[in-house]
Image: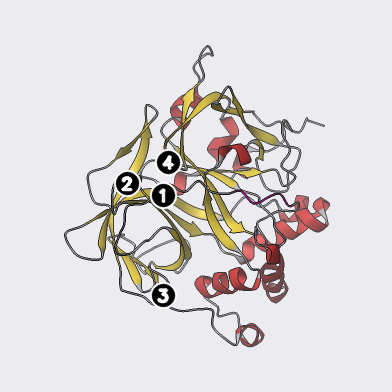
Amino acid sequence: MKRILLLALTVVMASCASSPREPQSEVKTERAPSAAELTGTYLGEGLFNKRKTGIKRPAMRLYLDRAQNEGDVYYGVLLEYDQLLNMAAPYLASQKAPILNKVVGYLDKIATRISVYKFVPSGKAGSYEMHNVEARNGQLIVDPAVAMTLNLKNGISNPLAGATITGNAEGEIVFPDATAKTGFFEKINNSMTLTQLELATVVYKKGHLASSWRGNWENLEGSYLSEYGRFKDGVLELSSQNGQKKMKFIKTNKTKAESFTNPKSGNIVGEFVVVEPVPKMYVLIPADGRVPTASDAEMTNRIGLFLDVFDGSAPEAGSHLVTELAFTAPRDPKDFMMYYEHPQHLKNVGVEPKK
């Protein structure tokens, strides 16, 4: 069974999507010249030998985007993948036999940790201090304390090849200067010894997938689901009116709180105005004229991020674009929320009624 799921994951895990749309063009601002342009997305591995629970060698993803008008400074998103094999069964069920989702569950676990940092050059060449970023009163606040450090190594295959992130109490994060290993299918036949990084590398290569941090709001509006595959449970609606971005959270009638990526999502309701203090980072402010709720305190210090973790926008991957919307929590990478764009890019789906 594991072999079947692994092969299926490699072939069909294309952006958790089922209908194509036109690829969105990211807005690119003029960049100040730098010795090495780091903007991009990078696949790495956590070597968490001090971790007591969870995956000790997870695949990691780092998204970097140069800060506007700040020289050699970047904002970044660090994501830790969940077990990739666990994603195959619920995704395949939603595509081929939705009734089976009641048995195998729905896809709501793509990542286990997501966090936001500002990367600032340190006094050492090729080294960047990583500072935690959180939302407060509609703005982004950067913690002056150094959380971790990114150390570049002059890699060959990409700017972060051979780099390490140090300072994590559980161990370091590495970005190997290597491509997908040969003999992959032979290795499957012999044993299930692939690391999460090796598996992720081949999934992205064989599936012609990328991984993207998006920021074009007009292409991201519409209904977002409590879980991928629960297509009638549109618990979040993104829209705009007179140039003002808005989000409306709708309490689900069907999905139990523990079924969300984060159980806290089960109680979130209300309308919010959305501001973008930094490109691709979204902060919520309670809409005018409504009664304050407990959701306000829960959501206004989070940062919203549109992450297409398995980006299948390439023609070879089917030109699919379906995005996950994550809300990070300040100083707690495990406390993020995640919502799933409707694969048909529908609007005003609403929540599934009770039966």
Q: Earlier in the sequence, mark 4 or mark 2?
A: 2
Q: Dot 2: within a 10 Å radius of its alpha carbon, few (fewer than 14), some, or many (20 or more) residues?
A: many
Q: Nearer the viewer, residue 13 or 277?
A: 277
Q: Secondary structure at mark 2?
A: strand
State the image coordinates of residue 346 (x, y, percent, origin top left): 73, 38
Q: Are marks 1 and 2 in contact (CB under 8 Å)?
A: yes
State the image coordinates of residue 33 (x, y, percent, origin top left): 31, 57
Query: CA gap, disc 1 to disc 3?
Result: 21 Å
Query: CA gap, disc 2 to disc 3?
Result: 24 Å
User: Is label 4 or label 2 in front?
Assistant: 2
Amino acid carrying label 2: it is Asn
Q: Secondary structure at mark 3?
A: loop
Q: Dot 3: within a 10 Å radius of its alpha carbon, few (fewer than 14), some, or many (20 or more) residues?
A: some
Q: Main secondary structure of the magenta part?
A: loop
Residue at point 72% right, 32% down?
351
Amino acid carrying label 3: it is Pro
Q: Which span is picked out in magenta?
A: 20-24
Query: Does residue 315 lie above or below 146 as drawn?
Result: below
Query: CA gap, disc 1 to disc 2?
Result: 8 Å
State the image coordinates of residue 214 (x, y, percent, origin top left): 53, 48
What mark, if any, has residue 329 been given in the picture?
4
Q: Earlier in the sequence, mark 1 or mark 2?
A: 1
What mark, if any, has residue 176 been given in the picture?
3
Residue at point 72% right, 69% down?
8
Q: Secondary structure at mark 4?
A: loop
Q: Dot 4: within a 10 Å radius of its alpha carbon, few (fewer than 14), some, or many (20 or more) residues?
A: many
Q: Nearer the viewer, residue 140 or 54?
A: 140
